[in-house]
């Protein structure tokens, strides 16, 4: 049987200035084909100004089991947010 | 992560993502449902693709091509979502070819006239929309996001179909007859798209518990009928159901009994086009093999040259 | 029929027939991604055809773009014969498209400087699309030519068969010359050198052998076609011909 195609993850920048967003995947045998396939599949309605493709095998993901250790500690450090601070009444531009 | 924690997440309307623990049965159910959905989109390209070369105007032709290529795109979003569950697109296609996977039986009906393009867009895509809008809230993340994308694109499909029916219904006598004939042939198969009645649907229990499905078959079917009857009236076509009647108490339409023998026949492989649809898909796949192999070989050579 | 009308029709006809051929690939491509790519090319071609037919209809004053596409007979079509060739296998389509895309790229690039503003605008728009088509067909020709022995043989055979249709692309007849002198038309013969450069470079990368120029098919501009065109039109025009009073 034929071997499986290579899977590539696709990231689209919809408008100049915005960040690329993950759109899904495409199958392709080389990077040129991957870019073109991504263009065909994900930008038919003017949704793109730039495309990135990355072989899926190169994506590294955090693990769900590590979720608590990775992300919970930042939940109780409200002093990182400007809303934590009370400013003197009448003060401007701060 | 165990079954209890998993169900808690589901009940709290949290999304399950590819790396999360999930019961084996949940994974299997999703693979079956998503891949069937994907296969349906791809097989659906055939009955509609049938009229591309004969579309009666430049505009109609371009619109139909755009619609059918959207279906290919939808199939791809869905295969892509399914692959996150640990199965390859190639395996899914093999299952389809081996007769181990199903697809929506509506696509086992032939498209006999141009008006069928109208009927399919209006009714079949219309039914798909009712189903897909509901599925936007499905519990599995990649499937839910795929549905949101698909729903955005699907409304043009329904409008394209309804526009064709509306124009034909107010056209020449022959056009109106053609449109009515298409409606007559596609009405019942369209409402059968929602599947067996709830009482005959064994998998509905789990699907609802795990929030894979958000509404039952009968509920979605009723939604679709309630939305569509008025649309037929507006363009002057008659729905071929003598028992169709507004029920003031339920605030819904009562409708006639479906032909369940026909339904199960078509689902089980004995519809007018079942063999043809699969054969076409296999043929395209087989004829393209040398191309796929050549492309891989070329890529290998390039890699070697680069290293 | 004015010269400008005929000239515009020629461009429209080639786009239409190639678009029709490409639309036949729907649900039959080697991969789903490629199915979408081929339909996109088809849509581009029909878009180009519509643009040029609209202009031709304007020039004529009595017919619509659809009338021109759906109600003319075989001998009234002026497309290049090359675009009528059957799709055949995927490699055959790629070879046919590559040879035509390379021409179209140079042709539209030149036409974009036409003194006729409408033709120039249509050409500029089409050029963007054709750049992508040429990229697509070139890359695939290289993959197939430099893929496996099987794929190389298939596309080499296609190239050998289709080569006879390339001569017609560079012909100039009285209408071409007349409009060229007005600064409207393109000097097709002047495009040959650059076309050779593009083609030779890609064929070399694709490990393919350029066929010798022997017999060259001709006649598209005079409404002389391959036997394929009749069948293409019969299928395409059927509904409009069967229901002459209907509006679609």
Image (cartoon, rainbow, N blue to C red):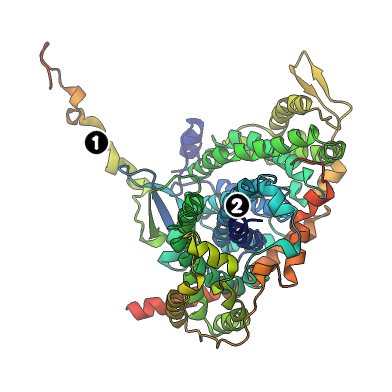
Depth check: give the residue in front, C136 or A93. Answer: C136
Asked whether residue B72 appears in the rendered view, the answer is no
Q: Position of residue C94 (x, y in %)?
A: 56, 71
Which residue is under mark 2? B69
- How far is mark 1 from mark 2, CA to CA? 45 Å
Q: Residue furthest top?
A: A89
Q: What number of labels is visible?
A: 2
Q: Tell which subunit mark 1 falls on.
A: A
Q: Residues within 10 Å of mark 1 (few under 14, many from 20)?
A: few
Depth check: give the residue in front, B120 or B286. Answer: B120
Q: Position of residue B253 (x, y in %)?
A: 78, 22
Q: Position of residue A56 (x, y in %)?
A: 41, 59
Hey, which quadrant is residue B237 in on the image?
top right
Quarter of the image for the C terminus of chain A: give it. Answer: top left
Q: Which mark is residue B55?
A: none
Residue drawn at (79%, 50%) of the image: C239
Asked whether residue A49 appears in the rendered view, the answer is yes
Q: Tell which subunit mark 2 falls on.
A: B
Q: Secondary structure at mark 1?
A: helix
Does mark 2 fall on the same chain as mark 1? Answer: no
Hey, which quadrant is residue B97 in on the image?
bottom right
Q: Measured along the vertical axis of the image, is residue C23 above or below residue A87?
A: below
Q: Measured along the vertical axis of the image, is residue C239 above or below residue C131?
A: above
Which residue is under mark 1? A74
Image-based side of A19 in relation to C217, left or right: left
Residue drawn at (46%, 60%) of the image: C183
Quarter of the image for the N terminus of chain A: give it. Answer: bottom right
Image-based side of B118 in relation to C194, left or right: right
Q: Secondary structure at mark 2?
A: helix
């Amino acid at each position: 049987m034929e071997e499986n195609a290579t899977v590539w993850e696709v990231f689209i920048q919809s408008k100049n200035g915005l960040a690329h967003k993950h759109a899904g995947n495409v199958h392709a045998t080389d990077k040129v084909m991957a870019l073109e396939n991504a263009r065909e599949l994900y930008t038919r309605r003017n949704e793109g100004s730039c495309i990135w493709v990355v072989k899926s095998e190169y994506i590294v993901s955090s693990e769900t089991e590590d979720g608590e250790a990775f992300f919970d500690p930042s939940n109780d450090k409200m002093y990182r947010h400007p809303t934590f601070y009370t400013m003197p009444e009448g003060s401007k531009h701060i | 992560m165990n079954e209890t924690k998993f169900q808690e997440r589901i009940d709290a309307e949290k999304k399950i993502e590819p790396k999360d623990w999930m019961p084996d049965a949940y994974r299997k159910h999703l693979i079956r449902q998503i891949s069937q959905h994907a296969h349906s989109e791809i097989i659906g390209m055939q009955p509609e693709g049938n009229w591309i070369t004969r579309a009666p105007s430049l505009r109609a032709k371009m619109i139909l091509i755009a619609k059918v290529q959207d279906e290919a795109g939808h199939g791809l979003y869905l295969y892509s979502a399914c692959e996150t569950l640990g199965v390859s697109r190639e395996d899914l296609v093999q299952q389809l070819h081996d007769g181990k996977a199903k697809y929506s039986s509506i696509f086992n009906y032939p498209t006999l006239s141009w008006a069928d393009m109208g009927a399919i867009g209006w009714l079949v895509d219309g039914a798909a929309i009712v189903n897909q809008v509901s599925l936007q809230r499905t519990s599995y993340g990649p499937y839910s996001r795929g549905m949101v994308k698909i729903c955005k694109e699907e409304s043009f499909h329904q409008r394209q179909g309804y526009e064709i029916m509306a124009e034909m219904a107010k056209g020449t006598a022959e056009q109106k007859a053609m449109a009515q004939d298409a409606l007559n042939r596609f009405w019942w198969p369209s409402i059968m798209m929602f599947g067996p009645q709830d009482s005959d649907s064994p998998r509905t229990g789990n699907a609802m518990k795990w929030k894979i499905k958000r509404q039952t078959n009968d509920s979605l079917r009723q939604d679709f009928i309630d939305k569509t009857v008025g649309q037929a009236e507006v363009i002057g076509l008659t729905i071929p159901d003598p028992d169709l009647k507004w029920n003031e108490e339920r605030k819904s339409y009562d409708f006639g009994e479906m032909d369940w023998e026909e339904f199960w026949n078509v689902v089980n492989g004995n519809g007018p086009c079942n063999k043809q649809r699969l054969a076409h898909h296999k043929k395209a796949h087989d004829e393209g093999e040398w191309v796929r192999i050549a492309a891989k070989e070329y890529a290998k050579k390039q890699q070697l040259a680069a290293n | 029929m004015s010269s400008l009308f005929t000239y515009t029709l020629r461009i429209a006809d080639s786009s239409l027939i190639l678009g029709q051929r490409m639309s036949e690939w729907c649900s039959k491509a080697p991969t789903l991604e490629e199915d979408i790519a081929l339909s996109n090319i088809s849509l581009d071609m029909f878009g180009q055809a519509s643009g040029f037919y609209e202009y031709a209809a304007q020039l004529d004053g009595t017919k619509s773009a659809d009338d021109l596409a759906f109600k003319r007979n075989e001998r009234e079509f002026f497309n290049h014969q090359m675009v009528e060739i059957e799709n055949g296998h995927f490699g055959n389509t790629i070879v046919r498209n590559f040879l035509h895309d390379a021409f179209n790229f140079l042709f539209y690039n030149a036409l974009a400087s036409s003194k006729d503003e409408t033709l120039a605008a249509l050409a500029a728009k089409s050029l963007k699309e054709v750049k992508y088509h040429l990229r697509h067909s070139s890359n695939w020709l290289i993959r197939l030519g430099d893929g496996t022995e099987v794929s190389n043989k298939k596309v080499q055979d296609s190239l050998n068969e289709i080569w006879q249709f390339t001569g017609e692309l560079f012909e100039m007849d009285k209408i071409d010359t007349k409009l060229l002198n007005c600064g409207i038309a393109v000097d097709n013969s002047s495009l040959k050198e650059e076309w050779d450069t593009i083609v030779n470079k890609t064929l070399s990368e694709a490990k393919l052998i350029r066929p010798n120029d022997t017999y060259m098919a001709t006649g598209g501009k005079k409404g002389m076609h391959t036997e394929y065109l009749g069948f293409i039109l019969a299928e395409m025009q059927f509904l409009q011909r069967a229901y002459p009073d209907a509006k679609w």
